[in-house]
Image (spheres, helix red, strand yellow):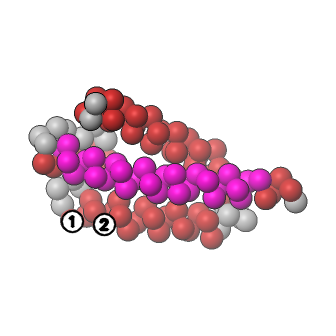
Amino acid sequence: MARTHVRYRILLFYLPVIGVFNGLDFVATQVLVVQGGHFELNPFMNWLIGTPYFALYKLVLVPIGLLFLWFVRKTLAPRYLVWVKLTAGVYIVLMVYNWMVFYS
């Protein structure tokens, strides 16, 4: 039982981290790619940038997905906790890279 609560606390930490970094990534992409003339390295998102679907995906669908993971934490989330941690780690590295390369 205690181990389950630890998983929930870990998930409760990482899901907002992903949400915040997703929002920062949206802003950085808008500034650097849409307005700044840089290019997007993510081939899956490249075709969405500059369209209303980009904001819909980043600002609506991703948060809904994070909420979904929280609501199914008892059944589905324990299997995907490693992926949630990996995603948060990738976002942290991406934000540090963006900050060091483009904003310092």
**Considering only vertical position in the picture, is 25 above or below 71?**
above
Label 2 sits on a secondary structure element that is: helix
Mark 1 is on which residue type?
Pro
Q: Badge 1: how crowded within 10 Å, few (<14), some, or many (20+)? A: few
Q: Which mark is residue 60?
A: none
**Considering only vertical position in the picture, is 98 above or below 2?**
above
- What percent of the width, then of the height, locates residue 12? 63, 58
Q: Which residue is mark 2?
A: 56
Q: Which residue is mark 1?
A: 52
Decide which of 99, 2 is in the foreground and name it: 99
- On screen, residue 29 versus residue 17, left or right, reads left
Is the C terminus in the top left, top right, bottom left or bottom right quadrant?
Answer: top left
Asked whether residue 81 is in view, the answer is yes
**Magenta region: which residues?**
6-33
- What percent of the width, then of the height, locates residue 27? 28, 52
**CA–CA distance between discs 2 and 1?**
6 Å
- Asked whether the beta carbons under mark 2 and mark 1 sit within 8 Å of each other, the answer is yes
User: Looking at the image, which residue is at 37% across and 56% down?
Assistant: 23
- What percent of the width, then of the height, locates residue 36? 13, 42
Mark 2 is on which residue type?
Leu
Decide which of 53, 101 is in the foreground and name it: 101
User: Looking at the image, which residue is at 16% across and 38% down?
Assistant: 38
Asked whether residue 47 is in view, the answer is no
User: Looking at the image, which residue is at 34% across and 48% down?
Assistant: 25
Decide which of 36, 64 is in the foreground and name it: 36
- What percent of the width, then of the height, locates residue 3? 83, 53
User: Principal SS element in the magenta part?
Assistant: helix
Label 1 sits on a secondary structure element that is: helix
